[in-house]
Amino acid sequence: MNGYFADVGALARKDLLLELRARDTLPAMLLFVLATFVVFHFALPSGSSALAASGLLWVAIVFTALLGLGRAFVPEREQRVFDALVLAPNDRSAIWVAKALATLAFLAGVEVVALPVFAAFFHGIGAATVGGVVLADVGICAVGTFVGAMATASRARELLLPLLFLPLAIPIVIGGVGASIVDSPGRYLGFLAVYDLIFATLCWASFDYVVAE
Amino acid sequence: MAVAIALIFFVAPEDADQGISQKIFYFHVPIALTAYACFGWGAWKALRHLWEREPGADLESYTAIHQGVIFGALTLVTGSIWARASWGVWWTWSSNQLVLFLVLFLFYCAYFMLRYSVEPGPQRENLSAVYALFGVVLIPVSFFAIRLANDFIHPTVFTSRGPQMSGTMFTAFCVALAAMLALAFTFYSVELVGKRVDARLRELRAAERPATAARRVPEAVAR
């Protein structure tokens, strides 16, 4: 089990180092989310309710995540690292855990900037929204990296990722929007936690089949 | 099927406040349940493929999901007609079942995109099977999510106190459900036979090609 965590740590460190040196994903995600907010400002006619802005925050989060997820397996594919990782004598689900953690780090990094900016542009954000965002991020990264690996194996790749991901992300959006707009968000936060648990377990158990030839 | 139609139109009493439009209930609900059954069967076969490496399970899973999508599309159409007849709108977001079917329809359409964008082989079988399993988990999760998100105007006919309808209506409903399942099963078998013949033919062709090539070489040498 120790070896498993060491594998995960090494793989996640590789992704973070790669990003630190190349700096191509994180700035792109940041710029994207800011540009989205500006678009939303003009998409919402003046006099729209604060509820509409809360909903759009979730649209921005899901699409920004999608941008990062689309890049997640690009280094593996371009440099043929995937073959080596699959051949390596480690548990293959470690590849998924590490990739999900690295993507989660990127997404959290973007949100640390994006949420205060949202609060400045539109309206303040409560603790429930932040909690919802954290729980949703876990689900988005778990499921997103999983279907990202699937999409990498196909011919259509980037085209396929949103198609595979969005139907699975609808419950996340429902839970997240619910948590940020209702007065007692407990049920929605609980739902997000259950979603994370179910899908993370499923991904963890079946990742082996996705990468195995 | 014919018995079911006869029962629906001649035996079952008309609903007090919905009148004739309520008859579509006997099509809409059995079609929806049949679609669920198809998705469930597809996921079961997918599990068999992954777990036991059962030969042919991939094809069966694919065929079941194909039928599920066809019945799912029919559910959307009949549900939409029913909504038009009884609520006066073609589409309503507060109808949980309709929204769920829309989500599932999108999900399983993506299944086909995935399947046709991967080269045929063991990896395609694995990816399809895993995605099919995700679908069967997504059904209850989405169901609860949509339920959380909504107020209810969709009538809940089956409650914890048992079916809320009269005896003849229930009989007609059960016969309609059985008929729909039989119909789905027939389609499934026919499509499966077709797909199996197709796969077998392709195998034979692939096996024959090297053989004819081998036969040609000595001829060429002899010449």
Image: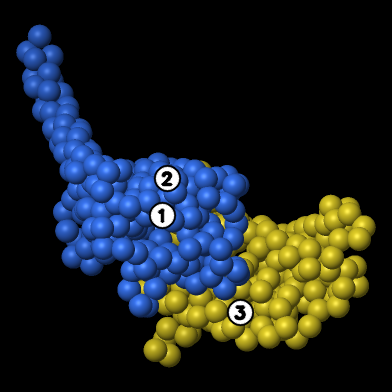
Which one is in front, B126 or B215? B126
Mark yes or no: residue A85 visible.
no
Amino acid on which disc 2 is placed? Ile
Residue highlighted by disc 1:
B15
Report, in whole angstroms, how far the alpha carbon at label 2 lies from the one at label 1. 7 Å
Report, in whole angstroms, how far the alpha carbon at label 1 lies from the one at label 3. 37 Å
Residue B171 on image: x %, y %: 23, 58
Mark 1: give few (<14), some (14-19) or many (20+) Cα within 10 Å: few
Amino acid on which disc 1 is placed? Asp
Q: Are marks 2 and 1 on the same chain?
A: yes
- Which chain has been coloured yellow in this picture? A
Mark yes or no: residue B9 visible.
yes
Q: How many marks?
A: 3
Which mark is on residue B30? none
Mark 2: give few (<14), some (14-19) or many (20+) Cα within 10 Å: few
- The quadrant of the image that shows the N terminus of chain B is top left
Residue that appears at 26% across and 58% down? B168
Residue that appears at 26% across and 53% down? B172
Tell me the SS state at disc 3: helix
For chain B, what colour was chosen? blue
Residue highlighted by disc 2:
B20
Horizontally, residue B135 falls left or right of residue B34, namely right
Colour scheme of the rendered structure: by chain
Mark 3: give few (<14), some (14-19) or many (20+) Cα within 10 Å: many
Q: Furthest residue to the top?
A: B223
Which one is in front, A199 or A190? A190
Q: Are marks 1 and 3 on the same chain?
A: no
Residue A151 on image: x %, y %: 49, 53
Report, in whole angstroms, how far the alpha carbon at label 2 lies from the one at label 3. 40 Å
Residue highlighted by disc 3:
A188
Q: Dots 1 and 3: beta carbons under 8 Å?
A: no
